Amino acid sequence: MDINLLVIGMDYAKYLAGRANWIKGSALAEVMKKASELQKKGMKLVSLAAGDPDPDLIPRKVLGEIAREVLQNQPKSVMYTPANGIPELREEISVFLKKYDNLEVSPENIVLTIGGTGALDLLGRVLIDPGDVIITENPSYINTLLAFEQLGAKIEGVIVDNEGMRVDLLEEKIKELKAKGQKIKFIYTIPTGQNPMGVTMSMDRRKALLELASKYDLLIIEDTAYNAMRYEGGDIVPLKALDNEGRVIVAGTFSKVLGTGFRVGWIIAEGDILKKVLMQKQPIDFCAPALSQYIALEYLRRGYFEKYHLNSALLGYKEKRDLMLKALEENLPDAKFTKPIAGMFVMLFLPEEADGIAFASELMEKEGVVVVPGKPFYTDESGKNAIRLNFSRPSKEDIPVGIEKLAKLYKEKFGE
Amino acid sequence: MDINLLVIGMDYAKYLAGRANWIKGSALAEVMKKASELQKKGMKLVSLAAGDPDPDLIPRKVLGEIAREVLQNQPKSVMYTPANGIPELREEISVFLKKYDNLEVSPENIVLTIGGTGALDLLGRVLIDPGDVIITENPSYINTLLAFEQLGAKIEGVIVDNEGMRVDLLEEKIKELKAKGQKIKFIYTIPTGQNPMGVTMSMDRRKALLELASKYDLLIIEDTAYNAMRYEGGDIVPLKALDNEGRVIVAGTFSKVLGTGFRVGWIIAEGDILKKVLMQKQPIDFCAPALSQYIALEYLRRGYFEKYHLNSALLGYKEKRDLMLKALEENLPDAKFTKPIAGMFVMLFLPEEADGIAFASELMEKEGVVVVPGKPFYTDESGKNAIRLNFSRPSKEDIPVGIEKLAKLYKEKFGE
């Protein structure tokens, strides 16, 4: 039976929901597809394109032992957990947030999710009406922008400098949108180690942001994905820790500690928002993976966050960050790039008129170096010349090699 | 700082999306909450309320070894996977479906999801417009009903007998809905080992269902959650295996094989539906857990599905089913209940006018036996007297004890 032939007759498009029009593909998928094709052809690539921590800085041997113990000794590790997650892990996260983020949160206000991505989508589903405006940093994390757009949101960005979102411009933006009669639903921010910029919002800006949210009665969704990847700026605390009014909802994750493959994140929320998140969660994904939850629990209980992350992996990421910044300074002393004190990204700006997408493509084909063009992260027509560089995943050897090759093409195209 | 006091001031309700009104709580949550309270008070409960396989029939020792190996040897097990899942597992699933379900599916048409729950929600998001009608079995799986309702669907049920959905009544239903000008988006069915009824659709009904879908140009979403829990009826194949027109979209899962805690399921789809599912997936949950994907891969590759499931666990579930049916026949010879040839549930019907919710509550308090009232699974006002019984998770010892106690209360209330 020739299934394909018969199937050609089906017009699936007519069954799609109207909301399917809001589903847009990620421009990054193209980059990754091309990279994968070149690799299949046998080309050796240096990738500065990742969005993951380094699997060799993650204590996989130890996690493997924990996984074995958990599966063998804890029957619940193969079963559904409560929709909001196992109570023991929510308690450990409460202790963890107090200790490392200066954040007092009751375990009852924590809902375990499918990573930070799942946390943001769940919040979007509870909060966003089609046509609502979400204010974000410009640029911001592409998957979150796409997730909110899938729900019908309109994204308005506020530009970012070395101290994070230009909160001084935020008030103008709010006034402008209100004048146009638009409904602003919330402000989405990644204040620490922002993706893709790598910048961290200063304490002054954090306070100013909260004041504006209060003045205009807005919610803030704080994405704390990179809070466990802070190299400097020890006095900086999450927005939530400064929030006296309950305006800040948190989307957090263990992805940058245990690895992105475990899919354990969390929401911190209260009142009716918490209630609706809890009600909608089980029919959507039932629960975060039980095995991952029990692994995270043992990791925290045994003090491994300090031992294997703070006192080990984090130093490795810091070293890699230093290597990347050094290579950029040496090879492209006049270029503009961010200098992250947290996270895993550096944003490099090509000369004003340059096309980052074309540059990334040429860099991959000519030099075998994969980078992510910044453009898709921007909420407007800017950012054409931006290139996102990742330093967490490439090896220490690959970082200078990648930057040297990038600099070579940069100089060929734009001069010294 | 008294956070609670301050937070009382926040009116979160005003920020909620309109769609949040469609989010309804599950009536089952109440049962589980009460059970958990009684257990905390030290009451020993016999539970016939689960929706999980038995963690002691799952080869947890072996899975633990696999998890350790995978984490230690496969760096990708801690990283993001492609949004549609690792190619190796999609290939293994393609082979698996051919071998055990007589289903020919290309790995390119398989998208790995957060369990079957995640598969159904993703499909709903691509297909359902607010106001669309979904036809389901009546009763049907409560979480799916809630997931579709969260997206604005209206549910219309078609009653179920021992051979599954009454397809003879389906055509009337379709005509009636069309006459009212309603838009039927798809038919959702769990043809094998239906939850909560435990019944399996006969081959004749399967063929008739496909014919009707073709006649009225409707899609079918086939939930194959219990396909790996078939005790009899070896000639029965999935609807998808009979589908010459590409009308059937599949939501499958490893939850009943590996355990529900791994969160690995799949969608089988084609054309524009597949395309939209793929585009929306990464922003929603990024990917199914990598560790779970690699564990499932090794489990299949090593032939463990046959060794540990077909030739071992499945016999255990069959034995438990027999124990439950025997206990029901002996203790309640005149009561009406389903006789499953697949899945993990028996539906017991109390006398016509009885209130299953009140009975379940009394049974828990008086006899310490937890069961799930059937009513919340029904799409209309029927099913008041239904009680869902699970035989997969309780121990072989608990099954007759639970049924005897249930029968005792039954007789007290309704006579012999």
Image: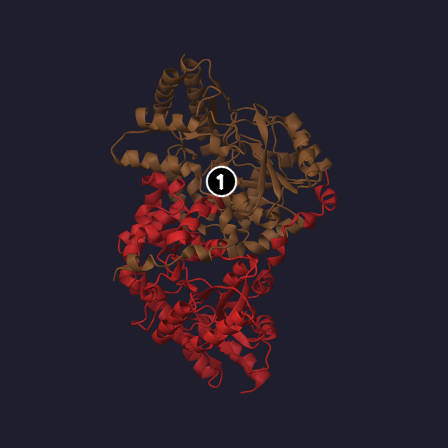
Chain colours: A red, B brown
Which residue is more in the foreground, A171 or A117? A171
- The answer, for residue A162, to whether it is visible in the render is yes
Horizontal side of A197 relative to B250 (left or right) equals left
Measured as percent of width and height from the top left, residue A366 is found at 59, 73
**B271 vs B356, nearest the viewer:** B356
In this picture, residue A63 sits left or right of residue B281: left
Q: What element carries label 1?
A: helix
- Compared with B49, A391 (above or below) is below
Does residue A378 sit above or below A123 in this rendering? Answer: below
In the image: residue B95, left or right of residue A343 = right
Label 1 marks a residue whose chain is B
Of A76 and B337, which appears nearest the observer? B337
Q: Given the current orientation, which residue lies at the most extreme bottom position? A: A416
Task: Count how many numbered circles sit on residues in the image.
Answer: 1
Q: In the rendered image, which quarter is residue A20 located in?
A: bottom right
Q: Position of residue A68 (x, y in %)?
A: 35, 45
Q: Where is residue B315 in the image (x, y as percent from the top left)?
A: 45, 26
Check the picture and name the quadrant holding the N terminus of chain A: top right
Check disc 1: other Cα within 10 Å, few if <14, some if 14-19, many if 20+.
Answer: many
In the displayed structure, A322 sits above or below B94; it is: below
Left or right, B29 with respect to B173, comes to left
* Residue for badge 1: B143
The amino acid pointed to by label 1 is: Asn
* Residue B53, percent from left and from top: 43, 34
